[in-house]
Amino acid sequence: MPEVAMVGRSNVGKSSLINALVGRAVARTSAAPGKTRLANVYRVSPVKAPAFYLIDLPGYGYARGGHAAVEAFEAVTTAYFERASRGEGVSAQKAASPSFAGALLLVDSRHPGLDADQRAWAWLGALGLPCHLIATKLDKLTRAERHRHLQHLQHVYACPPVAVSVLSGEGLEELWTLIAKLLRQPPPPPV
């Protein structure tokens, strides 16, 4: 089955977004950053798209346990994406049958253009993997802030973000449309 990976800073809302997408609490969430410590794999069977694996990767930038923990968590993400760039996804039986459909880089819409997010975007681009920008926590912005921050994100990343709120459900249908599009595309050739 194809795989869609979620990557982003610690506490950006990856696990909460997974729960909102599937409509139930399957991913553990916490107000404290660094809760996700491993690559968690969820089998998702949407009504309007083929079944796929949604990969919840540890966040970058913070972890309980200091610098060594940050390096350990980032190593999990690095290993996953290096396998994906070679066509060896979590569900692949062999390298000749790549399963990686794309990555969703989640950024906090309240903090557009952070250096760590820009480095993650550039790194994913350098791997040659399909990647899309998702702006989370939209409900925490005023109408004026939304407009200004989303424009800034589009300028920094040279693509329009899909803006979502797990609390209001805003943007979730647009995100499902994007995921369905990723699942219909042929996987990238191994590097």
Image (tube, rainbow, N blue to C red):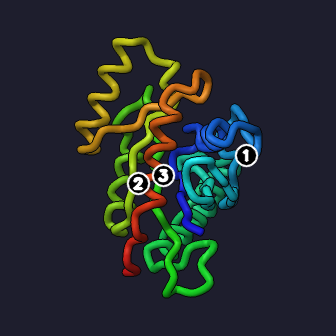
Distance from label 1 to label 2 (Cα)?
A: 23 Å
Task: Read off the residue under disc 3.
Answer: 180
Q: Residues within 10 Å of mark 3 (few under 14, many from 20)?
A: some
- The dot on residue 182 is none
Upstream in sequence: badge 1 or badge 3: 1
Q: Are marks 3 and 2 in contact (CB under 8 Å)?
A: no
Q: Residue at x 62, y 40 (%)?
A: 21
Q: Nearer the viewer, mark 3 or mark 2?
A: 3
Distance from label 1 to label 3 (Cα)?
A: 21 Å
Q: Position of residue 111 (x, y in %)?
A: 42, 30
Q: Residue at x 40, y 69 (%)?
A: 186
Q: Nearer the viewer, mark 1 or mark 3?
A: 3
Does residue 134 appear left or right of residue 152 in this picture? right
Three-letter code for the amino acid on which mark 2 is drawn: Ala
Could you say whether the residue bearing mark 1 is in a helix, strand or loop?
A: loop
Q: Nearer the viewer, mark 1 or mark 2?
A: 1
Task: Read off the residue under disc 1.
Answer: 27
Q: Residues within 10 Å of mark 1 (few under 14, many from 20)?
A: some
Q: Residue at x 40, y 80 (%)?
A: 190
> Which residue is at the front of the view, 175 or 146?
175
Q: Residues within 10 Å of mark 2 (few under 14, many from 20)?
A: some
Could you say whether the residue bearing mark 2 is in a helix, strand or loop?
A: helix
Task: Read off the residue under disc 2.
Answer: 120
Upstream in sequence: badge 3 or badge 2: 2
Three-letter code for the amino acid on which mark 1 is drawn: Ala
- The quarter in which the N terminus is drawn is bottom right
Q: Residue at x 61, y 56 (%)?
A: 54
Q: Position of residue 65 (x, y in %)?
A: 70, 51
Q: Position of residue 188 (x, y in %)?
A: 38, 72
